[in-house]
Image: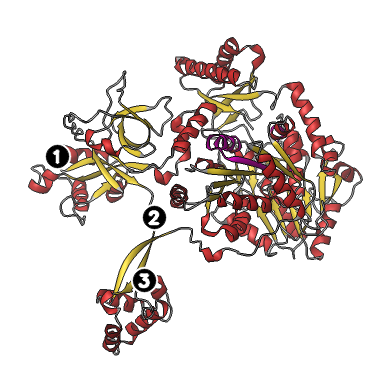
Amino acid sequence: MSQTHLFALPADEPSAAPADRVTLFADVVLPLPLPKLYTYRVPFELNDQVVIGGRVLVQFGAKKTLSCIVAAVHETPPKDYQAKYILEFIDDAPVVTQPQLKLFRWIADYYLCTLGEVINAALPSALKLSSESRVQLHPQYLAEGTPYPLTEQEEKIVAALSAGEDKVEGKALTFSEVGEILEINSFHKVIKSLIQKDVIFLFEHIADKYAPKVVKKVRLAHHFVAEAALEGLFEALASKPKQLDVLMRYIQRVPVYQNEHTNHGGLEKAALTSSPHLSPSAVNTLIKNGVLEQFDQIVSRFPLDENDRNQMPFQLSEAQTTARDQIMDSFGQKDITLLHGVTGAGKTEIYIDLIRSALDGGGQVLYLLPEIALTAQIVTRLMRVFGSRLGVYHSKFSDNERVEVWNGVLSGRFQVVVGVRSAVFLPFDNLSLIIVDEEHESSYKQYDPAPRYNAREVALMMGTFQGAKVLLGSATPSVETYYQCRAGRWGLVSLTKRFGEAGLPDIELIDTRRNAQAGQKKPTHHFTPELTAAIEGKLSQGEQVILFQNRRGYSPFISCLDCGWIPKCKSCAVSLSYHKFAHELRCHYCGHHDQMPRECPACGSRAIKAIGFGTERIEDDLKLMLPDALVQRMDLDTTRAKNAYQQIISDFEQQRTNVLVGTQMVTKGLDFGNVSLVGIINADSIIHYPDFRAHERAYQMFVQVSGRAGRKGKKGKVIIQTGDPQQQIFEKVMRNDYVAFYEYEIAQRREHMYPPFARVIKLTVKHVEERVALDAAVRLTQELVERLGRDAVLGPEAPYIFRIRNFYLQEITIKLSREHTVLKHAKAQILESLNLMRDDKNFRQARFVADVDPM
């Protein structure tokens, strides 16, 4: 839709209220970080149109026109300001449901952000109205012209505006289009001059970005459908063979003889114009002469046919059936259950069976996955079972595709949705089952911008609000989740064996320091002889290999061998990583990039060397070591395109690739039947990280990536390269002993009061000046200590990466009791402290970020 609002003219005051009409006010959620809702007055003539959850158009501030969501309707005017009138109602039905609004309020409250920030993150951008200044010829100029002379530049603008098809209103131009016509950057003076001469006026154009997918179709004109008329048409076209060919093709594809109603749906025009045997001009001539009618039809962007379903019976194994029954029993007593199954145990088949049961009961299902990479494999399997009832939702989809899924959930077309973390914002109102697969994954956490939510926690609250059961699944559950199960609050079901004949892989530790001390020859410094031999052996047997290195790029940094110079990012306190393919240095925090220097800028030496290795270097070296092998890489650099994940996975599944090198993307639930070897190149970099979750993440990553090997009956092997094989974590990984790992980890958490025994909130202070950042952090810490006590507040301290995007950082950690009343009180005190800091004139330019339950 498209609407205009003239800023030059004030909105007309609605007429006096009829005696039987009440004055209504609407509290709206503006897509801005405002702490309160804003109240607008509903025009009397629109009282019957106001709908909670619908979008309305309002004026905010002097010249801002925004779309927002109606959160409440009442009869109480605001006390502190005069309510403006709502300009227009965009929707006659909610685009945001009542359960959503309740959930959004909880997210804002729990994660210390505003409702506007939640709405901004939740709504697909195509559902938000875009506002852009435009100019149009003034009605007075169209009627009378102007007595003022126009410059050459002004004449150009008037000529462009006069070229519109609408003879009454003329054409509208955006500011950017004006600049292109004049071919200058500074064009605002020209616009101002034309406004003063009453030649043009300025207005704000509001356009709903969502556009349905439309295809052009043709059908036979209705008066030719009758058999006699059609025979006469054939005779008339006998001397025009190209047009006759088009008509024959249409009749073949749309058999109007058998059923006249089949003609109504017509045929896609492209089916005729793109055929190499037909003339496009002949198609257009038939349309021009009225033989064919051209029309537009809105179609789905997800053309799933019911015939695509696999109607074959779906059989669970005995172990899977037992686990499914145990889950159902658990749901009879508890709302949340954990399915703890080893990698390759067949959890997905159990999920599918549970989804079918939920749909048969008339409910909706949300199936969450941590990464887009997983959706490619999972969606293919789900489509075969659920067909057109399945929707897919993730960030690689276009805005229009996401809106189509949003509307599909609202209308009931999509009864089950598989998606990544943002899928928790979809407008469900009848959820009966939520599945959170790989529930331990940090990818469920949103880091920036606000709301900094964890989709797993939001899913649990969705289940509470809608009365849905929640199933968490993982081979390596988070410590917090397993603790809840052990405490008896959540149900626990275990699958201890792999599906079918597959067994767990053998795991071998390789001591890289011992190899180096023994002087063993190796092809490159990051492949041990044992790993190299294992790769060559598996490839010679026609089997596939996955190599894991949790660092992208060619090398973490470069250095001058003579003076030790290392290039740093100008905006962040990190070294620049070398990317060989682009032959440039990049910052992985702010995106800054520089050309690879030919010589050291410090001493002029050309002895510059890449230090360390990332996935790009491993891929490069493998191609030199194994020239006959087909090597592919899966990391952030190779998966930016929309379908890149799917293509890489498809190539590996179809065995068009022998070796897959990747970051943690390759650890997450992927299922490849021919992989018999997994190599972990540098395990130590994952273990030794300054974070209380470091060992938990390392254990999860090692077990998950190991689980990619030997999944279809073949005995798999995992080789872990480490310089410290005595680390306790390796023993637990090799025995696949999650319980032993959990017992050790939970004891450490209890001793140091970390989750699940405490709630953690991290506050980050940012400023472009290091001294101001520290002063603000010290002042905020003092304020928090007075309110919460010294024991609850740790810091401030500079993080490991102390400067990002030109902002110096200071962090304050707050540890709180898990009791609801304590947490609620503490959050209120934190918000008050932050507001005091923002009001302090010395820290007005500082930024304060609150992260609840940081990962």
Region of the chain picked out in magenta, as a range: 456-480
Q: Where does label 3 land, which residue?
A: 266
- Name which residue type carries label 3: Gly
Quarter location, residue 185: top left
Question: Looking at numbered disc 1 in the image, what kind of residue is underneath it?
Answer: Lys
Residue topped by disc 2: 212
In-front residue for pair 152/545: 545
Q: Of helix, strand and loop, which one carries label 1?
A: loop
Residue 383, image x and y in percent?
57, 58
Q: Residue at x 13, y 45 (%)?
A: 139
Within the magenta stretch, is there residue 477? yes
Alpha carbon distance from label 1 to label 3: 53 Å
The residue tagged 1 is: 197
Type of amino acid at the residue the image marks with label 2: Pro
C-beta proximity under 8 Å, tags 1 and 3: no
Q: Residue, x 16% and y 29% (percent of image)?
A: 16
Report whether 372 appears left or right of 542.
Answer: left
Q: Is residue 24 left or right of residue 201?
A: right
